Amino acid sequence: MSHTYAQREEQTVLLATFRVRHALCALDAAAVQEVIRLGPLTPVRHARAEVCGIVNLRGKIVTILDLGLKLGFPAIVPSANSRIFIMEDRGEFIGLLVDRVDEVVETESGDWQPPPTNIAWGQAQFFRGVCRSGGKVITILNPTPILAEET
Amino acid sequence: MPHLNLDDELLQDYLAECREHLATIEADLLTIEQNGEQIDEQLVNRVFRAAHSIKGGAGFFDLGIIHQLAHRIENVLDLIRSRQMMPTPEIVNTLFRSFDKLRDLLDHHQDSGSADISEYVEALTGLVECALPLAEKPSVKQKVEVPLPGGGAHIEVSAFDMTQARKGGKSVYLIAYDLIHDIQRNGKTPLEVFRKLDQFGSVMEMMLDIDSAGTLDDEPVNKLLLEVLYATPLDTDLIREVVHVPAERIQKVEADGSVRAINAPRPAAAPPAPAPQPAPKPEIVAAVKEPEPKPAPTPSPTPTPAPVATPSVSAPESTVRLNVTLLDSLMTLAGELVLSRNQLNESLARRDDRAIRSGAQRINLVTSELQEVVTLTRMQPIGTLFSKFSRLVRDLSRNLDKDVQLHTEGAEVEIDKTILEGLSDPLTHMVRNAVDHGIEGRADRLAKGKSATGNLTLRACHQAGQVLIEIVDDGRGLAVEKVAASSLAKGLVTREQLDKMSDREKLALVFLPGVSTAEKVSDVSGRGVGMDVVKTNLDKLGGKIEIESAPGRGASFRIKLPLTLAIIPSLLVSDGGERFAIPQVNVGELIRIPAAQIAQRTDRVGDALVLTLRDHLVPLVHLADAMGTARSQQDGRPMNVVLVNTGAFAYGLIVEELHDTAEIVVKPLGRHLKGIQDYAGATILGDGRVAVILDVAGIAARSGVSAGTAETVATRGGDEAVVDAQTHSLLLFHNAPNETCAVPIANVSRIERVKPSQVETVGGRRTMLHRGASLRLVTLCDVASAGELTDSQQYVVIVFERMGRPIGLLAAEPLDMIEANLDIDTLTLRQRGIAGSAVLKNQTVLMLSIDELAEAVCPSGYDEAPAGYNDEAPKALPAMPVAGAPTVLLAEDSEYFRHHVQRLIESIGCNVITAEDGAKAWDLLEKNRDHVDLVATDIEMPHLDGLSLTRQIRADKRFENLPVIALSSLAGEEDIARALEMGVSEYKVKLNEDELTECIRTLVMPHS
C-alpha cells in the first residue's frame, strides 16, 4: 500500500525545514509534535555523545539529541536561534536540537529524488531523499533511525 | 446488539477473572486437603464454581483445550463435593498440577489450542474412574450423543457426566433457544438467560445450531438456535416457567441420550423434586462474559461460529481493578483543579495579588489531595501475595518431610503495586529459608519440647506511614556465631571487627554476599546466594530489613517498606552548578568537615581518598569525579560529605553543596539513557528544571568502590563533627524581628493568634485570658538575653503543656513548619532558655528549651496553677540535683536529645550520668553500680544498642531489679513488645516529656 502511495504524483507533503550547520534539512511536518526553544538543559553524564541533556516538557522528561552530531556534523552550538523539534517515537517524546528553524514548504513526494550516492555509508540511512524548493536543495530526514537508540 | 464480536476487551475481562479465581483456589485446596474427610461443602463448592466459571468462559471464547481441562477438574471436584471421593494429598496434588496447567494455558491462551493436556486429562479421568463403583467405571470414557431436533448434528457428553447430572432426581433437558426471537426480541441478553438457568440447575453443554439458520438456498427462516443441555431438579411443568421458550423446543433427555418432547405423555410419574443441589451462584455466569447474539434481522448466508478476535499478548498486570468511588473522587479533584486554574488565570489577568495567592494555595491543596488519591489507586492488598505462599509452604514441607503451618495476618494491608511485585522474590526466598533450615524436622522439634508442627507467620501492618512485614518462624533460629564464622571464613570481616559488633550487627552480616548458615547445601536453600539478593531487592524498593533471632526459639525478619515508590523523600545536593537528588533511604548521615580539619581527617590510601569516621575508614568519592566534571575549588571551604549506603556497604560522596530534603516525584529516563548505572531516574524540581536522581550503587561501581574496599560503618555516633542527621520536625517563629526561633512540633499543643491588647500584665507577670482561664505567658526575653517583641508584629501564643498545665510562649509571625536534618550546635549560642542553634537556609535559628522557659517563669511549678488545671497535676517540685537524690544513667547517642532528656530528668531533682552509647553506659554502670537507681536508654545506638544493653543488665545478678526505661522516638506496639521482652521496665517516647518524668518519678521516687 505505502509503496503505491509513494509513487503517486499528487501526494503533498508539508516539510518543516531547518538548518543543521549550513545544511538545509527537513522533517515531515506531520511527524513533528511541536518546536520549542532551547531552555535550560540538564546534562546527563556518561550518556552517549549525541545526548545533549534532558528537559522538562510539561511534566515529561524528554531526552534531547544533538542532530548535528547524529548526522555526523560537528556539535550544534546553542544560540538564541537554537530550537528543539519534539518528535514522538514508540510512545516516547524525544527532542532533536537544530541550529535554527526555517520555513514550512509544501512539496510533492513525486518530486523527491534519492539521496546522492556520495553520502557516507553510515549516514545514508538517515536520509529519505532530497528535493528542491525555491532554488534551494532540501535534505529530507528519516526520523526512525535518527531516533533509534542504537547507532 | 450489533453482531457477534467477542472483542479483545471481553476476552481480557474473562482472563482477568480467571486469574482472580485461580488466585483464591490454592488456599482453598490446601484447606480441603487439611480437612481430609471432614469435607467442607462450601469450600469445595467455591473451588468447583471457579473451575466451572473458567470452563463456561472457555466455551464462549472457543478455547477448547481450556474448556476440556476445566471440565475434567470440575468432575473431580464434583465427586469430592458429593463425598464420593476423599481429597487425599495425591488427589489434591493432581488438582494443583491441573490448575497450574490451566493457569499456564490461560496465560498463553492464544496457543492453547495446540497444547497437549492428555497427561492431565488422563490423571483426572483416572481419579474419577477410581472413585466410581465398578459398574460405572466405563461411563467415564463412554460417550452419549444427544441428537438435535434438526437432525444431523448432535451434542456429545460423556456417559459419566450424564449419570452425574441425573443423580439426585435431576432431569436433563435439551432446550433450544432462538437467539433472535427468544432472547434478543424479548429485550434480554444471553447473560441474563444463563444467570437464570444457573439458579435452578447447571448448564452442561451448549452448541450453536448453525444448520437451523438454513442456507442461502432455503427460505429465510429467521432464527438462530442455541441448543443448551441443562440439568435441573425442576420437573417438566416447572421448567417452562423458568426457560420461557415454547414447549415444543424443550426436550427431556434420557440416560442413553434419547430425547422426548415434554408435552408427550410419559409412562412413569416425574420423580419428586429433591433438595436442590447447591445452586451455583450467579457469579459463575458473571464470569462468562456476555456473548453478543448473532447478527439477526436477515439470516446471514454462512453464519460462522464466534470468531475470536486475535488476542494481543496478554501482559498479566497491565490492568487494575478500581473502586468506582476512587474514580469519582479523582474526577471531583480534577474538576477542582480546573476551577482553581481558572480562578488563578483570572486573578493573573486582574493582577490581583491576594487572589493569586489564594488561588495558588487552593491548587496546592488540590494537588496534595490528588496525589493522595492517585496513590490509592495503585494500592493493592498484600494478601494477594501472601496467598501464594500457602502452596509454596505446603510443597516445600512435603518435600522436606516436615509439618509446617503457615499463618498470615494483615492480608488486607494495602501497598503500592510496584512494591508488591518487587516483594514477591525476596519474600519467597525468606519463606523458603524459614521452611528449609529455620523450622526443624518433627523428631527434632519434639525432642526440643516443641509441637511437631512448625509455625511460620507472615504478618503485615501499617506503622508510622510505612508498611511493616514480618516473617516469623518458631524454628531453631539463626545462629549468630555461624553467621559470624562464615563471614570471617570468607574474609568479609576481621576478628577485631567481629569483637566490636553487637549480635544484631553480626546477624546483619548474613546480608553480605556468600554468607550462609546452612550446613549442607540443599535444593531449597543454603547455597550462600540469597540473603544478599534479598537485601538488594529490598533496597531497590526502598525497604529496610532487620533480623532478630532467639536461638532455639525462632527467628523473625522485619521488613519496612514505603507505601509508594513514585514519590520519595530525597536529599538535594549540587556540584558544579548542577543539582542532583539522592534518595533519602540511601543517605546515612551528613558530615561537614571544617576546612582546617580536612587534612587531618582524610587520608590517601594508594589512590583512594578515605575519611576516618569513628575509627573506621570510609572511602570517599568526589561526585564531580564520578560525573566527569571539573572539581570545584575546595580551598578554604568545608568539605561536605554525604555518607551513602548502598545496602551492602557505605561510602562518602563529596559534594559541593548540601540543600534541603524534598519529596520528589520519580520519573523514568528516556530510552537513550537506559543502562547508565549512575542514575535511578530524574525528577522535576520546584523551579521546573530537571535533576537526575543518583543511584549510589552505580556510582560506587563506576568509582571502583565495592563491598570489599568499604567497611561497614557503625551507624551514627557521638562524633562531634558529625552532623546529627536526625530529622527534626520544627515549628519556626519569630521573636524580635529577624530573630528566628524553633521548637519541636511535638511539644506544641496549640497556636493562637492574639492582639497585643489581649496580653495583660498582672502582678508583674504577663497573662492572657484563654479558654476561660488565665494563661501564664512567657517571652524569650524574660529568660534569655534576646530581643523584645515589638507592637508592630503580629503576635501569636504557642501553647505548651508543662506538668499538666498550659504555658504560653508569646512570639510573632511568620510561622512555618519544617522537617529538616539539622546540625544542632549546642555550644555557641547556648544559654538559659536556648538549647542551641542551627543554620537553616542561611539563617541562624535558635532552638528553644521549653523546660527552661517553663522553669524560669514558674520555678515552683505550682504557684499559680489556675483552677481546673492542677487537679491531675503530678506532685512535682523541680529542684536542683542534690546529694542523696536518685541517680539516673542516661544512654543516648544523639547529642541534642541527650542534653534535652538530661535537663528534663534533672528538672525533677535527679542526678544524671550520661553516656553516648550502650557500651559506655555499661562501663559507667559498672563503675557506679551502687549509685545508679535507674537506667534510661535510647533504643538505636552504635556499639551496643538499647535492647542489648538491657539484656546485658538483666543477665547480671547485681542489676536484677534495676529499673530500665527504654526511650525511643517511635512507639509502635511491636517495638514496645520487643523491648518489654528484653526486660525493659517501661517504654517511653522521648518527646512525651510529662509522661517520661512521671514515669521516672514513680520508679525512683516512690516517696514523693
Image: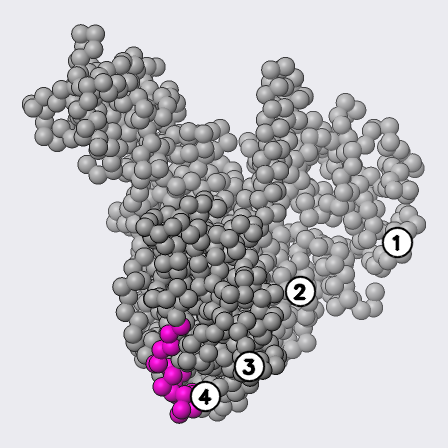
Q: Can I make out residue B420 in this image?
A: no
**Horizontal and vertical percent for residue B344?**
61, 23
List the residue tagged with mark 3.
B169
Which numbered tag is attached to residue B987? 2
Is B427 left or right of B701, judged from the image as shown? right
Q: Residue at x 51, y 65 (%)?
A: B248
Q: Are marks 1 and 3 in contact (CB under 8 Å)?
A: no
In the image shown, does B86 or B335 lie closer to the viewer? B86
Compare marks 1 and 4 and give the one earlier in the sequence.
4
Q: Look at mark 4 in the image and give the residue it sits on.
A: B442
Gap in angstroms between the C-alphas marked 1 and 4: 62 Å
Determine crowd level at label 1: few under 14, some 14-19, many 20+ residues with C-alpha closer than 10 A. some
Q: Amino acid type of disc 3?
A: Gly
Instruction: Considering the whole magenta stretch, tell me its main secondary structure.
Output: helix
Which residues are drawn in magenta?
B127-146
Q: Indicate whether residue B469 is drawn in magenta.
A: no
